[in-house]
Image (spheres, rainbow, N blue to C red):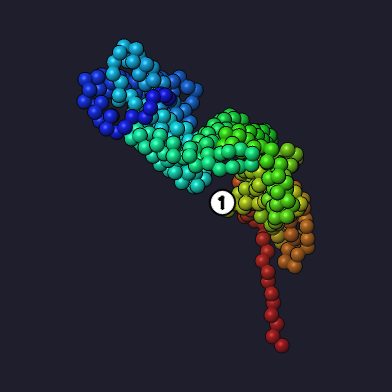
Amino acid sequence: MTTDAAPSLQEFLNALTHPSAALELAVIAGCLGLAWALVRLLRGAAASAAPSVLFGRRLVDGLLFPVLALGLALAARRALIAADVHVAVFKIVIPVLVAFAVIRLAVRVLEAAFPTSRLVRVVERSISWLVWAGMVGWVTGLLPELLSAMEEIHWKMGGSNVSLRTLVEGTISAGVVLIVALWISAAIEARLLSGASGENLSLRKVAANTVRALLVFVGLLVGLTAVGIDLTALSVLGGAIGVGVGLGLQKLAANYVSGFVILTERSLRIGDTVRVDNFEGRITDIAMRYTVIRSPGGREAIVPNEMLITQRVENSSLADPQVLLQTTVQVAYGTDLDALFPQIVAAVTQVPRVLAEPAPVVHLSAFAADGLELTVNFWITDLENGAGGARSGVNLAILALLGRLGVEIPYPQRVIRQA
């Protein structure tokens, strides 16, 4: 960014009538057009055209366009000064491009790091307003005066003398460092999770969460240093946090530790079908604090990770995805079961979701009051699609078979005798 003093608004308006203003505007338009062409060329050469931090959704709303435009504008400004051309328009265009680049960086990184958070939208708007306000203050000459006034406000913080300007500038630097750390962690997470599934997805999830936590922690330390906070004072803060965890944050800490244990041990994986607290469904996400389980009916349960560690969890997919299902049917007494059993097995095997190996099995399970009760056992491997559809298919196949064979399905009969 230029090191010249900030121009006043009147100086800028006067510069627009200077003979060189038209040349500057033409050069700036050329810089913007060249930056747009370069972004389009680079995006066409990229392996993926999906929205990203660099390219955005429409080329000009990503980070790369304002950064390239800023670089070209700085180079053009230097060339005009070397050619002894009066430069004035660039003094407002360059701050505008800087503000545009900062906003694009913050917005795109926060969208990539927290795609589903509603609070992010509020933060994005706040950052945009603050950046544009700072740019306007710089152009009008108000910002340098405000910074000078803030320099005069200072106080003692520990062994250091901190001014309000230092605190504000350090906070901005800390925010930039954290945004860059989130950008790097989001890019690494997207690369790790792309194309992963099952057990591999769980392992990559562990790595992605660990990388994000480390980068944010390092960014936080760098940001605190930029603000001017002595990191040795964090030992006292760490002790206070430890007491808080021991007293009031036990459950929260237990959930985070449990999430790390689950992801590390791989006792539960994304895609497994589980039953927890009488809720059965498929694991769709394992976060550090909770696990999301989606039932075949579309309902989702957010289960704290501590519950998955301390309570009984039925996992139908841990060692073997094959799941045994049962259905029952009654036939009349006197039915030839030796001839009927193989035909039931053959009919059930033809049902699309039923496995041929292990083969279905039919048992005479009870002598009921109205007929012989038969239990049909069969196996499926896609329990995440629901057990009701598979059981219905088997029941329909058995019903059709018994109808073709003329086998009677008894129903309760009661004889009432009147004295």
Kind of residue sitting beneath label 1: Gly
Q: Nearer the viewer, residue 262 or 406?
A: 262
Position of the N terminus, as image quadrant, is: top left
Q: Nearer the viewer, residue 412 or 197?
A: 197
Please tell me whether mark 1 sits on a helix, a strand or a loop.
loop
Label 1 packing within 10 angstroms: few (<14), some (14-19), many (20+): few
19 to the left or right of 361: left
Count the labels in the image: 1
- Outermost residue on the top side: it is 83
- Determine which quarter of the picture holds residue 64: top left
What residue is shown at x 25% (from left), y 22% (from top)? 21
162 versus 83 height, above or below: below
Q: Nearer the viewer, residue 294 or 75?
A: 75
What residue is shown at x 40% (from left), y 41% (from top)? 129
Q: Position of residue 331 (x, y in %)?
A: 70, 59
349 to the left or right of 55: right
Q: Which residue is mark 1?
A: 298
- Determine which quarter of the picture holds residue 16: top left
Q: Position of residue 80 (x, y in %)?
A: 32, 15
212 versus 303 height, above or below: above
What residue is shown at x 22% (from left), y 22% (from top)? 18
Q: Is residue 273 among what the camera can see?
A: no
Position of the C terminus, as image quadrant, is: bottom right
